[in-house]
Amino acid sequence: MPTTSGCPWARSRCVRTACLRGWHHDGRWPGEAGLETGSQDVRVSRVNDSDQTNRPPESHRGGLTLRRSRLPTDTHDQMLLDSRGPVDWVHTDPWRVLRIQSEFVEGFSALAELGPAISVFGSARTPTDDPQYALAEELGERLVGAGYAVITGGGPGIMEAANKGASAAGGTSVGLGIELPFEQGLNDYVDLGVDFRYFFARKTMFVKYAQGFVVFPGGFGTLDELFEALTLVQTGKVTTFPIVLVGTAYWGGLMDWLRSTLAAEKKISPVDLELLTVTDSLDETIDVIITAGSARRAREREAVATTAADAE
């Protein structure tokens, strides 16, 4: 993979994307031949370093950037799930399946060689002067020190902080973006970025290529990812997958409700609460992740040994 050394945009952070759009980044300008890595064309889009607060809202559709009167009013998820329109949707869904398939192929291709990684979630609205921002940045650094890449949703707030820490530590900083009515784009600290139209394709990447979740205070999107992971662990779809909630004051009310309502009314088993670790300590967070990783590797070695013994 070519590097960004000698790039005319050396002062800017550049984002490798797997969405087959953007600028070539092999020292050649647009219009010249693209890079090839195996069979996949990898292109790099420039992240603007200028103050983005004055930029108009924008949306991306394939290689198109749409602004002002050209902004679409619907996202691809809306068009897929909306049942109110005319019946001609029957004729468009088969083609939409191919687009969905392409998102999985692009995600798998981009992340297949990522190595051990941890997904970090939290509010996009967390300001840079919030103590949680500094904590997420430190976590990104420490995860890299422990041998993990950092995966986030690629947005601002907690996501930006974790990407910033991982990038500063020289690790792999991944951002999985999503098409929204008013996009904010990938933050400047994402080194490997993949854009998605559909939430379910993006969610698959968060779980498939991570060895655990760390969840900071956040809103509906954060809760969505949290309970998705909990369901997968509870049902055995993924194993040895630690989930750490950072912020005892923030998550305490949720834990009380899970214990006093769901568990008390036998909607979940009391042991299900043990799937979560709630802490304010990054030391404990890292310990939980490393311990789970060691257990997973031990089980994998045992499985290999058992298979070899059965083959004999």
Image (cartoon, helix red, strand yellow):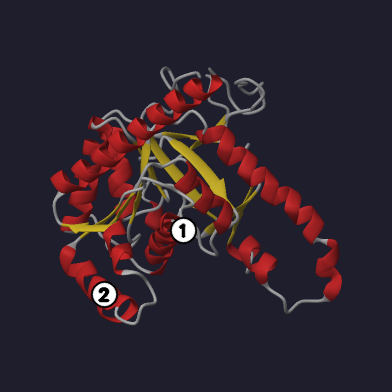
Mark 2 surroundings within 10 Å by alpha-carbon count, few (fewer than 14), some (14 through 19), many (20 or more): some
255 left or right, relative to 15: left
Using the rendered image of the protein, determine whether residue 19 is visible from the camera's viewpoint. Answer: no
Q: In this view, does 179 lie above or below 270?
A: above
Q: In which quarter of the image is residue 286?
A: top left
Out of 251 and 72, give the one closest to the viewer: 251
Q: Is residue 131 above or below residue 164?
A: below
User: Horizontal and vertical percent for residue 43?
Assistant: 57, 31
Residue at 56% across, 40% down:
107
Q: What residue type is labelled 2?
A: Arg
Q: In this view, does 227 lie above or below 47?
A: below
Residue that mark 2 sits on: 259
- How far apart marks 1 and 2 lie (CA) works out to 19 Å
Q: Quadrant of residue 300?
A: top left
Using the rendered image of the protein, determine whether residue 88 is visible from the camera's viewpoint. Answer: yes
185 left or right, relative to 254: right
Residue that mark 1 sits on: 235
Out of 11 and 169, give the one closest to the viewer: 169
Residue at 31% across, 75% down:
263
Mark 1 surroundings within 10 Å by alpha-carbon count, few (fewer than 14), some (14 through 19), many (20 or more): few
Counting residues from the start of the chain, the first of labels 1 and 2 encountered is: 1
User: Horizontal and vertical percent for residue 33?
Assistant: 66, 21
